Amino acid sequence: MSGGAHVLLVEDDPAVRRGLAANLAAHGYVVSEAEDVAGAVRHWDTMRPDVILLDLGLPDADGSTVIRRVRREATTPILILSARGDETDKVAALDAGADDYVTKPFGLAELRSRVAAVLRRAAGPSADPSGTIRHGPLTIDVTRRIATVGDEVLELTPREYELLRTMLAQPGRVLTKGRLLRAVWGTAYADEGHYLHVYVSRLRRKLAAADPDGVIRDLIIAEPGVGYRIAERPAG
Amino acid sequence: MNLRHVREEFRRPTGRRLAISLAVVAGAMVAATAVVAVLESASVGLADASPVYFVAIVLVGSLLGTWPAIATALAAFVVYDLLFTQPRFTLVVDDPREWLDLVVFLVIAVVVGRLAALGTERAAEASRRAAESTDLFAISRILATAPDVEEAAPVVLRRLVEAGELERAWIVRDRPGTGGPRTIADTDGGSPVPNASIVVSLVRAPGEVPAHWVRAHEPGHDPGRRRGRPLVRVRMEADGVAIGALKATLAGDRREPDRTTTRLLSLAADQLALAIRRDDLRREATEAEIARRADALKSALLDAVSHDLRTPLASIRAAAGSLTDPEIAVDADAARTAASAIDAEADRLDRLVREVLDLSRIEGGSLRATLEPLVLADAVGAVVDRLRGALGERPIRLEVPHDLPPVRADAVLLDAILSNVVDNVARHAPAPAALTIAAAATPDGRVSLTVDDGGPGLSDAARGRLFTKFGAVGGSTATSRPGLGLGLAIVRGMAEAMGGTAIADRSPLGGLRIELSLPAAAPAPEEAFARPTGSAAARSR
């Protein structure tokens, strides 16, 4: 529980806003409320909150205006509150710099855990100074470009290695398809890039083969239509 | 038929016909006069052989008709008067009794000639009528048995061209409100419609006035250019509604159709007009019926949706009402129970709203699929993992090989389809009924996925309705129904949006089988293993 963190809640529906604000406050967050883009920007300028919960469909302007404005000045985590069926909007918001999304109607417990997660990630990168990324039994030695599960070395192709490294660099965060493609294939991903899902599938199978106990079975979570996410806390 | 043809040849008002008539009349006259001359000669000695002329008159009458017969009668009267009554070679008759004989002869000759001609003419008329009736019957039959006019009209027109003296016939349909006239059938389809400067239109007045042809110069044509065949036009009307026109060009160089062709054209135009009108009415009725059914479906959907929306709403209000009631002392446990009831009902509402939205997107055609190569095994695995709780304790077999070719599909739609189908199994084939999901590549470049359950299954009829709205449920007002039954209608709509299909069958496990077919994508390129670092290279050595 990240008690005391300052949450800016941007939501135009008063009932939803009041309910969320009351619940977050009860869980120790300091909550500011805004009902439109103008109010959100005003709060951002005067208060610099620790995390922003942003509804995309606001009365005065597109919510992504807020994302671009905030990203010019800071890396403050932004969590999108979006309606279902708006996968393209979600992807656009994530590509504009939002950190994560929850789909309405969401449960309050789920929302709180996402808020906690983006705040935790904002605290620091997961690679330690020695250049090693650890995630449960999975270790990536960035300098030697080697991935291991426990003691077993994964036989990865260069693309698969890059995919895994990019994903593991930001556990918990939704990585859009476009972001993964740019990170792994560069800008010239035209043809092979169509096969992102196939590459991820191969990577999954290799991870599963090296993980007979199923500890990291659900490591790579697909977000259909949006991209992928690395489970933050592998089971076990 | 042949004889009728010959007679019609004679009926035509041509110089040739006149010449032939004259020749026949003259021949008959010469022969009869010769016989009379022989009979009245001194050697035979008959006083009066004039009845021989009756034979000639009867022959001419039966062969050529009334007017040649009467002409022959008159000629016989004159010739007999000139040659065989005293004084000869003059029309003057001395003996008043002989004068009486001659007049009686003329009267009888005219009557005999007329009678002879009448019989033949009636026979000819009867055979013409018979042929006409045959043609009309054939046309009626074609129109009655063909599924619609568009199919029947070409056959009718061919028949008209054969029976009437036509070169080409076509039907032009008036299209009020939808642009210009349209040719719906043409015996010489493809070639441009003839451009005639003269149009002969059939004028048919109501009542006993016989139909007649009116010639007119087509406006816009050079009146000096009178060459080319006239165009024959018969307006088509039914129930006082203008339908269009039956048009034709005549064979030969006739100026207007003869009586037979006129009757044929006139009656065919009426029959065609009625058939076209009937088709129009039927089409309107079908459209009205489709609209009515769509309305019925919409109101059924509305009924079901409002019922299904109200039930969870009622639970939510009841729970919230007890929480807010100042008269009720709510302890923490009771409050939590009420809140989780609210949460569960809200979940139900969410699913319902999602289904209705999906369906309206499918039906509104706003469902856009973003197709990309997807690995079916991953998609199936994710859905089964997500719904494992709802599926409960049951044997689950996944036979979806990783080395199948990827499918070309939309990630969101594929996930929704699989969730719907598996959720359907969870709800309608309760645990411990088995669930098997298998996939295989098919030779036609597709991947087929089957979801089998060991549940109670469905009757053949129920399975046929499965993919329609409310297919999974009987009535739309059952109270213990777990869902609207929109799920599989959504599955099919989404599969089709991705170029796939979804069908239902009896499962070898005893329950229901849903079979999904999706186009396969080309296999992904394989990548070489290349280890850039020394230690990795050392390992792989």
Image: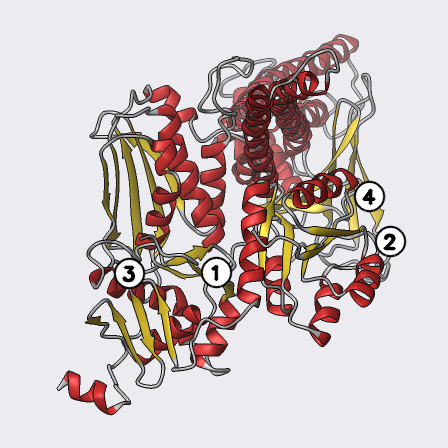
Q: Which residue is mark 3?
A: B405
Whether residue B536 sits left or right of residue B92 in the image: it is: left
Neighbours of disc 1 within 10 Å: few (<14), some (14-19), many (20+): many
Q: CA distance from mark 2 to mark 1?
A: 82 Å
Q: B493 left or right of B16?
A: left
Q: Is residue B311 above or below residue A80?
A: above
Residue type of the residue flagged with mark 3: Pro
Same-chain check, marks 4 and 2 = yes
- Residue A194 figure quarter: bottom left
- Residue drawn at x 67%, y 30% is B280
Q: Nearer the viewer, residue B503 or A72?
A: A72
Lower sequence index among marks 4 and 3: 4
> In front of the other: label 3 or label 2?
3
Per the image, label 1 sits on a secondary structure element best described as loop
Name the residue tied to disc 4.
Answer: B215
Q: Are marks 3 and 2 on the same chain?
A: yes
Numbered circle sitting on residue B145: none
Question: Chain under label 1?
Answer: A
Q: Nearer the viewer, mark 2 or mark 1?
A: 1
Judging from the image, what secondary structure is the residue with disc 2 in? loop
Callouts 2 and 1 on one subunit: no
- Rate crowding at label 2 as few (under 14), some (14 to 19) or many (20 or more) other CA atoms within 10 Å: few
Towards the viewer: B409 or A207: A207
Res B7 → quadrant: top right
Rendered image: mark on residue A172: 1
Residue A81 screen position, x and y as percent: 65, 51
Q: Amino acid at mark 2?
A: Pro
Q: Nearer the viewer, mark 4 or mark 1?
A: 1
